[in-house]
Amino acid sequence: MLSIWLVLVSCIDFVLYSSAEEGLVFPSFDGRDRVLNVNERNYKKALKKYDMMCLLYHEPLPSDKELQQQFHMREMVLEQFRMNKNRHIEESIYVFKDERVIEFDGELSADTLVEFLLDLLEDPVELISNPMEQRAFERMDEDIRLIGYFKGEDSEHYKAFQLTAEKFQPYVKFFATFDKGVAKQLTLKMNEIDFYEPFMDEPVTIPGKPNTEEEIVDFVNQHRRPTLRKLRAEDMFETWEDDMDGIHIVAFAEEEDPDGYEFLEILKEVARDNTKNPDLSIVWIDPDEFPLLTTYWEKTFKVDLFRPQIGVVNVTDADSVWLNMPNDEALPSAEELEDWIEDVLSGKVNTEDDDDDDDDDDDDEDFDDDSSDEDHYGSDDDD
Amino acid sequence: MLSIWLVLVSCIDFVLYSSAEEGLVFPSFDGRDRVLNVNERNYKKALKKYDMMCLLYHEPLPSDKELQQQFHMREMVLEQFRMNKNRHIEESIYVFKDERVIEFDGELSADTLVEFLLDLLEDPVELISNPMEQRAFERMDEDIRLIGYFKGEDSEHYKAFQLTAEKFQPYVKFFATFDKGVAKQLTLKMNEIDFYEPFMDEPVTIPGKPNTEEEIVDFVNQHRRPTLRKLRAEDMFETWEDDMDGIHIVAFAEEEDPDGYEFLEILKEVARDNTKNPDLSIVWIDPDEFPLLTTYWEKTFKVDLFRPQIGVVNVTDADSVWLNMPNDEALPSAEELEDWIEDVLSGKVNTEDDDDDDDDDDDDEDFDDDSSDEDHYGSDDDD
């Protein structure tokens, strides 16, 4: 199985920059090979040599000429930090940092991977020491966050918290405060840790303070799947694979668009009302953040992503049904949305019924991938 | 001069997707050539054929073998929507839409270019019709925004507003409302248009309502350079080229980081206090949004971008001086920041003094005033 390992070593530190326009120069390939070929004989040495190492694990090189060319292409692209991962070839990227091995399961673009690596270099726990920083903390409602109040850097409970933070970095954000005033504002007692689910106003306190590392890890693992979660480039595949019995409830909404924002507020209200329901986890996708997938989603799901949408997607065949929202002025109320979600969870609305009936807006004819003449944006009703 | 035109036609619509994991499949190259070679004979036909066309204009192919290989590489990458622009080879990307030619002067990555193209397909004017949408509008404080109150879709003044919006799309955002309640909240009278500078609380009303297209265009052009502007991938090179007598005041701050957020709030306060000063335009860069440039900036400017920074950068040689902030707990107050900015604008703090002296705290040498082209300000806009 294991045959070739490509290692992108300390990749953040190794680039040569072209120098025509000063101050804003993207790295470009200088011809020097910095991707090491790692095999069973030399991998230990490589692990020792570098503080942080990023590794692409892939299948043996194919003999077929076309595939070989494809591989060669990918290697060139990797050299430029422009990586392309073909999901149906089994490949993985691992980062080795200290004693930890972290799998990268996000979008394989240079931006996302480098951001991921930079995030791993940050302090695992951020300190909140004044009201302004507290406001910054409160604004980050898209992330799973923990915040603890400790005596100071030397506190053993703070140290346990720090060790836990390293385990979840960079996916779950850890904060701490040593400041009495901040703690009071957040209603935190000494050595108490609060867990904030994304988009919820109120946190949950981890019981049994002071907490051991194991207790915190267990609590995070148990509460890790939120009622409403935003799809993020850095762990999009992991999120997608974490489906609910083969389906996802997916909501598309552009936060920067007035309709999208309005729809999202309704969605958050529904999530807050239903946060106790373990069967509910809605994936919110902001199409603005995935421009390369937008057209693919529109074709696959047969929806117009210039407006908000919510639907059920079967993850094995990408079959889907979508809530009928005739126009921008007819967004559902929180109650209507809740009724629809109930119908989804009870199975009344599902992706299979749709197959033998076409009373919704979409036409069910097969989409011809080659029809390139009239692009379907032209026929949009929005213009 | 003109020799080869590469055209990426209707590129959004042309991709074939691999299909192993349903619901989340990035486009991958299928081997079919969709980049057309356009020359003097066929460009008219191409322009007629497509609603929107994206064009890469480049120099004749170099004879030198290495450069040729580089070009070949770029073409392959272009095929994958993974584009790499080498800024010191003169190349440009233009989008042809209706009667308009829009130069793309942003980061040449697939994500950014496709997002730019998708933005161009949106309605040029967004309607704000209820309090929730108004809140969405108010949250977009990073962008230059205009909002007008009109009788309805058929109003001739609204039509003039729409035509203007098309001219500035997607860089300047245009909104309108036909709703009396929203207009009242925004203190807009009938046919009145307000201009919002980024990060300012109060808008400026365009004088002389109702306004003609020409009046709105002139007003936007005159007010287009804000006191504080965020560097955006979609027009980063344009922004960088719009320097103030050869320098930029650059602030690095991660909005998602507590210290970065705090620093940014101080910066906004300074910008609000100084919005009437035509000599001041600060470029705010969030390093999180430019992971591929972070290491380059750290090396070039010799600063630690894991913390907030503010400095003066000479755009011709990337020489720079940075405000001394010993640690995270010692962010400057708004007053201290204002004093430092005053020193920059008066020339007391400048990038040249730093050269003959390693101690970068303020020294009092005279500013070497070799460039005093005063009328640079506000003159070099628009096509």
Image: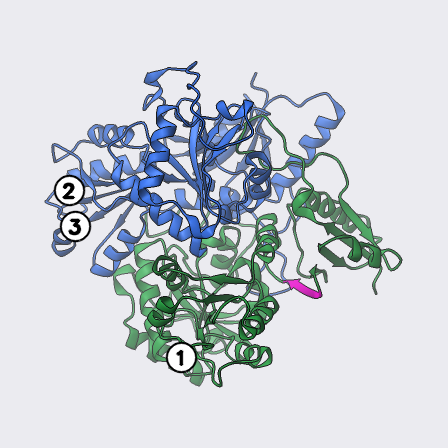
Chain colours: A green, B blue
* Chain hosting mark 3: B
A142 up-or-down from B327: above or below: below
Numbered mark located on residue A275 in the image:
1
Q: Which residues are magenta?
A: A99-104
> In the figure, A177 relative to A13: above or below?
below
Return the chain for callout 1. Answer: A
Q: CA gap, disc 3 to disc 2?
A: 20 Å
Quadrant, the N terminus of chain A: bottom right
Given contact means CB atoms under 8 Å apart, are the residues at marks 2 and 1 in contact?
no
| Chain of the residue where label 2 is placed in the rendered structure | B
Of labels 3 and 2, earlier in sequence is: 2
Asked if marks 1 and 3 fall on the same chain, the answer is no
What amino acid type should be assigned to the residue bearing mark 1?
Thr
Q: Residue at x 38, y 47 (%)?
A: B264
Q: Is residue B30 magenta?
A: no
Rendered location of residue A75, percent (x, y): 74, 46
Per the picture, the main secondary structure of the magenta-coloured stretch is: strand
Q: Quadrant of residue A310?
A: bottom left
Q: Is residue A365 visible?
A: no
The answer for how far apart the CA atoms under marks 2 and 1 are is 46 Å
Residues A290 and A346: in front is A290
Tell me how many marks there are: 3
Q: Tag 3: residue type?
A: Leu
Task: Kindly identify which residue carries mark 2.
Answer: B155
Dot 2 amino acid type:
Ser
**Within 10 Å of the Cα at label 1, are there few (<14), some (14-19), or many (20+) other Cα atoms?**
some
Callout 3 and callout 2 share a chain: yes
Residue bearing the label numbered 3: B186
Examine the structure image and report whether residue A103 is included in the region drawn in magenta: yes
